[in-house]
Image: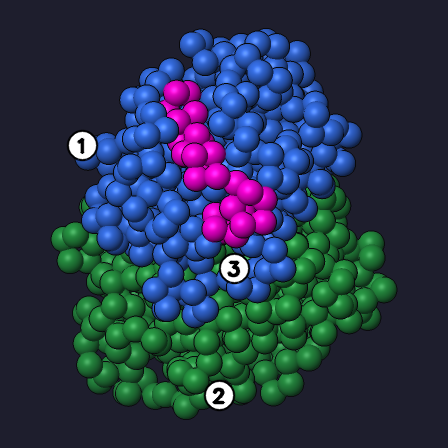
Chain colours: A green, B blue
Amino acid sequence: MREVAVLGVGQTKFGELWDRSFREIGIEAGLGALVDAKLSSADLGALYLGNMASGSLIDQEHIAPLILDYAGLAGRHLPGVRVEGGDASGGLALHQGYLAVASGLYDYVVVGGAEKLTDVSDEAATQIAASTADHEWEVVFGATLPALWALVARRHMHLHGTLREELAAVSVHAHEMGSKNPNAHYRNRLSIEQVLHAPPIAEPLGMLDCAPFSDGAAAVVLGPLEEAKRHTDTPIRIAASQVACDTMALQHRDDLTSVASTVRAARAAFARARRAPKDVRVVEVHDAYSISALVALEDLGLCEKGAAGKAYASGSFGLDGPLTVNPSGGLKAQGRPFGAVGVAQVVEIVRQLRGEAKDRQVPDASLGLCHDLGGTGATAVVHLLERAG
Amino acid sequence: MREVAVLGVGQTKFGELWDRSFREIGIEAGLGALVDAKLSSADLGALYLGNMASGSLIDQEHIAPLILDYAGLAGRHLPGVRVEGGDASGGLALHQGYLAVASGLYDYVVVGGAEKLTDVSDEAATQIAASTADHEWEVVFGATLPALWALVARRHMHLHGTLREELAAVSVHAHEMGSKNPNAHYRNRLSIEQVLHAPPIAEPLGMLDCAPFSDGAAAVVLGPLEEAKRHTDTPIRIAASQVACDTMALQHRDDLTSVASTVRAARAAFARARRAPKDVRVVEVHDAYSISALVALEDLGLCEKGAAGKAYASGSFGLDGPLTVNPSGGLKAQGRPFGAVGVAQVVEIVRQLRGEAKDRQVPDASLGLCHDLGGTGATAVVHLLERAG
């Protein structure tokens, strides 16, 4: 297999983009990544597009050729492939783009993620989000994603002594980081008190424990590492790209407080890259709900089980600590356009490793990790990225 | 890149499977392919699943881990990836499975295609089928897929002298072949008169020019060609796997009677395999509408432009001719479960190349072609398969 590098990144603002269509935001991100990679569309071999639910959200399937078409590339007849794995669709698309370049069949590919979530009602979006859980065993009985994650939170509090205030600290941290990110859906700071007193969604989770529904798109250009120096002074090597799955329904898992797909994907990624969790300086994890972030950090091996909440509460995941978590603001503050999230995580880590993250720059980051999760964890995708220049 | 072979095939009956769920049919096809390949699930590296619209059809996204879970494989934590490209989703999933094995990251993968279409109304299914066309330029103005293909048919009649009776001959041929296929949705024979007098859908296309909405699933097991002899006496080599895209909307094309994505994918496939259209003995083409089959055969280089209708009408595409078309019965008679179609085409060609097609066996087939198309052709996938044993 060839070594694969990220050569360019692009991203739209995340938020309620009511004046912009799905195709517009997809193209903005993709062309931004091409320009950043100093490539023209003539160099491109294929497009991989991560998207969760365009059929339900905008009555449009078949969106990879749609984006190629409206980017003016229909005449090149490039392959376009949509990849879906719930809200892990973006990370999964990146895995496919990685394989496409690694196989040698394609040299340069764009991997995009895009979702237009705010053109439907919050109720419809909640139902669509729940289509990542097990329809026949969970959703028909009324379960929603926040309700399922609330079960995980209760169990985590019971088994590991996690406190309600520690959950709240996840959101406070996310908004602190988001305040430094011009692309973030939310840039306001939050206090623990505000999170604790927000309206309940599914106890113990309140409104401010839940990431918003957002519109947005992100894209990266991948190419062979051996060619990377021709395109950028700061190529970022994909040291590992790993996917793992688990049961759809929570009830079929041995332990509610650990997501086995994350554990497996992370172990495989560290083994492949010959690195250890202690080598990771900066990480973007799935924090669709405050509890999700705690479970992720623990399952990735970045915290001991039960220790993530305490670390959040003590403020140790900031820019100056040994491990910076979600400098983008994460799903909670940067936003949650389902299929775009996993690609946006990579955009953020690439900017951190290049030293281009401005107000939110982590000092001396050479290895970063991206963790993308679908639903309650039936799909997990882990990427390890490292500075190659 | 490693050479890739098809080691096993499996398929459910296609039709109105009202007593069976999406997950049941997906698992039947996948396990059938594993058994046929003499592999156990312990050998598997990943699952690729082609599906067009499970979110709209069964309120369930995230279906690749769903199928792994209900196949009893959640504990193995294998990667599962859903791939979508309109009704070309199955062929596109095969392309991804091919890349996964060719890259060397995975040894054995299952590629499945599944769709459950008959649990919604025909009207809803028609709308969902139209989500493969351009929503903003075609569908909001009332266009459906048969209406768009009817425009193609009118233009083909005008430019190439194609007759209404020649279109009807496509369906007559399909049902003749379907009558020999125990998995086919329709096994009744049709006459030209019956097709001509069926209720109009979008003139010149009538009800019997249009493939049905079906439930169904199909699967293949892929592995490295060099290992294939350990699993089967009749390994089938994937000589080429090519994808190409075109504009979403018909109105943006230079020529309504040719689908550029098919032309490009076919040319690339023949070049890669160092073969020519004349070498193809048996082909499965996209015949969602009678006109689609004529356009496909001409664009693939298997007929001169304007000659496919005459060849159908003269009965030259049967089992004994120089080129056998859609021995499975095609989409028209075997059935049209969107995302399963492209995989079922490969199942049929593999059976033909192995000499296992019984009543519909083509004599001495050593090279076969599969042509999977999304919508009106924004995605085309071409696979060339050859006997390697």
Q: Residue at x 46, y 72 (%)?
A: A22
The alpha-carbon separation of the residues under discs 2 and 3 comes to 45 Å
Q: Amino acid at mark 3?
A: Leu
Q: Residue at x 67, y 60 (%)?
A: A75
Q: Quadrant of the N terminus of chain A?
A: top right
Q: Quadrant of the C terminus of chain A?
A: bottom right
Residue A169 appears in the rendering: yes
User: Residue A166 falls in which quadrant of the image?
Assistant: bottom left
Percent from the top left, x then y, of residue B174?
41, 27
Range of residues picked out in magenta: B152-177
Percent from the top left, x then y, of residue A307?
40, 64
Instruction: Say which residue label 1 marks.
Output: B19
Instruction: Say which residue label 3 marks.
Output: B250
| Earlier-in-chain disc, 3 versus 1 | 1
Q: Residue at x 19, y 58 (%)?
A: A143
User: What SS does tag 1 mark?
Assistant: loop
User: Residue B34 falls in which quadrant of the image?
Assistant: top left
